[in-house]
């Protein structure tokens, strides 16, 4: 059982990362309501496991629990069908220069949709890097992947995101005659 | 297409993850490789649009409130249906919750095991995050130290040292008043490449002042004491950049 002092430590060390926890859950689950429930579960789990936390990166420690709770939840809710590991065949083509200009105007809605369309493994590292500002080392710790995989995954995730932004309807590509 | 062998390096460079030697060699490579240069520009544009879109979603207050009192009071696993509760169980639960909230509140007021300095660092990182919200960065916007310095006169009970380090890669953007750890502090705003650095300045007071460096929520901070002031630089730039800024201040 956690004593009062541990509880205070938990509130001081782990709970400041509640925004990070919620943000990750929101993007993994693509839904604020589910994210609230799952974050709550994850924090309870973290609290129970707090005896095993000694020191180190509290944010990475909590996010690892959040991520695992999210994936368990997704599995249970049979929504993980789209989950795939980094796959060479899903790599899009490089974008050309004029298209990068168009990207500058991408608004929040477009980006949200594009990000939500990405496979979870890509979405996860993009959210951790671009929104949460995690270092490669932290992402590797949170996602239990080698740093090299994080690096190459991030490169591909960015390619895919750009591709999704440039081709909002991926199945119908129109070309100038 | 970027060159195969530099693609990972390019992202590492973009994310500030390369060591100085690799970063320098990559910059050298950039000079002679238009493909990599173009890819880097495209990646920077994507990064900018993500940042501009403000996609970060903060935890709702309801979640924060339910967790701050006492996490142990929460239902264990949400997927289990809650057992049917009788009125007296609700009353007992409410009493326990009230007590727990009161105890939790007391503990929150003075969390044991966490020093004032750590709380101050967290508070400064929060202030940095607030400053990044649209329209919150500067109260006085000027690259001229002779405009920024007098602006603080009468607004705060000390005169913070203000310098522009544009020649050294840290142009001054302006200044602002901020509140951290319950105190009013002066914030000097610098740019570092495309990043923002807040340098918080206050009068050194207690012996429990902030010193050293740390990381919180993905932001680095570096604190030092100089001429009776406490300085703390906060940013998402790499720690060596903050150390360089610190040296610039110390050289004044």
Image (cartoon, rainbow, N blue to C red):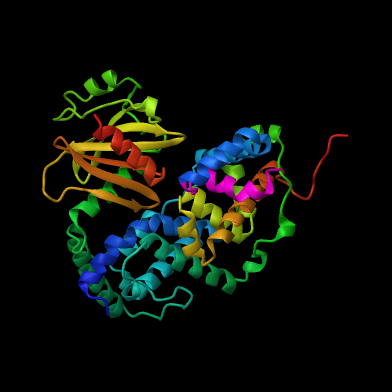
Q: What x and y, as percent, mark residue A23?
A: 46, 55
Residue B173 in view here: yes
Residue at (22%, 75%) from the top-left corner? Answer: A3
Residue B15 in view here: no
In front: B161, or B62?
B161
User: Looking at the picture, does residue B32 appear above or below residue A37?
Assistant: above
- In the rendered structure, which segment of residues is drawn in magenta? B1-19
In front: A116, or B244?
B244
Q: Is residue B17 left or right of residue A167?
A: left
User: Looking at the picture, does residue A126 appear above or below residue B161?
Assistant: below
Residue at (68%, 45%) from the top-left corner? Answer: B3
Q: Is residue A49 left or right of residue B91?
A: right
The stretch drawn in magenta includes residue A134: no
Residue occupying the far right of the picture: A177
Residue at (35%, 52%) from the top-left corner? Answer: B215
Residue occupying the far left of the picture: B206
Q: What x and y, as percent, mark residue A120?
A: 60, 60
In front: B158, or A21?
B158
Q: What x and y, as percent, mark residue A20?
A: 42, 56
């Amino acid at each position: 059982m956690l004593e009062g002092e541990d509880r205070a430590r938990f509130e001081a060390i782990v709970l400041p990362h509640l925004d990070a926890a919620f943000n990750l859950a929101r993007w993994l689950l693509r839904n604020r309501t589910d994210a609230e429930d799952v974050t709550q579960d994850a924090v309870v789990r973290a609290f129970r496991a707090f005896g095993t936390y000694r020191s180190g990166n509290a944010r990475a420690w909590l996010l690892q629990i959040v991520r695992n709770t999210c994936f368990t939840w997704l599995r249970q809710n049979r929504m993980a069908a789209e989950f795939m590991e980094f796959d060479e065949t899903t790599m899009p083509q490089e974008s050309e220069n004029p298209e990068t200009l168009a990207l500058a105007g991408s608004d929040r809605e477009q980006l949200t949709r594009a990000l939500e369309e990405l496979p979870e493994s890509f979405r996860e590292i993009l959210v951790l890097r671009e929104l949460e500002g995690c270092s490669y080392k932290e992402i590797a710790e949170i996602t239990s992947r080698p740093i090299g995989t994080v690096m190459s995954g991030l490169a591909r995730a960015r390619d895919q995101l750009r591709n999704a932004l440039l081709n909002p309807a991926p199945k119908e590509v129109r070309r100038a005659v | 297409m970027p060159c195969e062998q530099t693609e990972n390096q390019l992202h590492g460079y973009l994310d500030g993850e390369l060591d100085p030697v690799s970063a320098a060699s990559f910059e050298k490579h950039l000079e002679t490789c238009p493909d990599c240069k173009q890819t880097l520009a495209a990646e920077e544009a994507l990064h900018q649009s993500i940042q501009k879109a403000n996609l970060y979603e903060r935890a709702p207050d309801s979640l924060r409130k339910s967790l701050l009192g006492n996490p142990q009071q929460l239902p264990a696993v949400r997927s289990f249906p809650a057992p049917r509760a009788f009125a007296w169980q609700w009353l007992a639960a409410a009493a326990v919750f009230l007590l727990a909230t009161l105890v939790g509140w007391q503990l929150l007021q003075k969390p044991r095991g966490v020093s004032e300095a750590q709380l101050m660092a967290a508070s400064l990182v929060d202030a940095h995050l607030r400053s990044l919200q649209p329209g919150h960065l500067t109260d006085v916007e000027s690259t001229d130290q002779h405009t920024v310095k007098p602006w603080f006169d009468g607004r705060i009970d000390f005169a913070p040292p203000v310098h522009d380090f544009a020649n050294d890669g840290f142009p001054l953007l302006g200044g602002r008043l901020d509140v951290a750890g319950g105190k009013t502090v002066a914030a000097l705003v610098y740019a570092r490449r495309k990043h923002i650095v807040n340098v918080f300045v206050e009068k050194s007071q207690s012996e429990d002042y902030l010193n050293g460096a740390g990381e919180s929520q993905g932001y680095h901070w570096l604190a030092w004491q100089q001429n009776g002031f406490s300085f703390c630089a906060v940013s998402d730039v790499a720690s060596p950049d903050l150390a360089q800024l610190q040296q610039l201040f110390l050289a004044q």
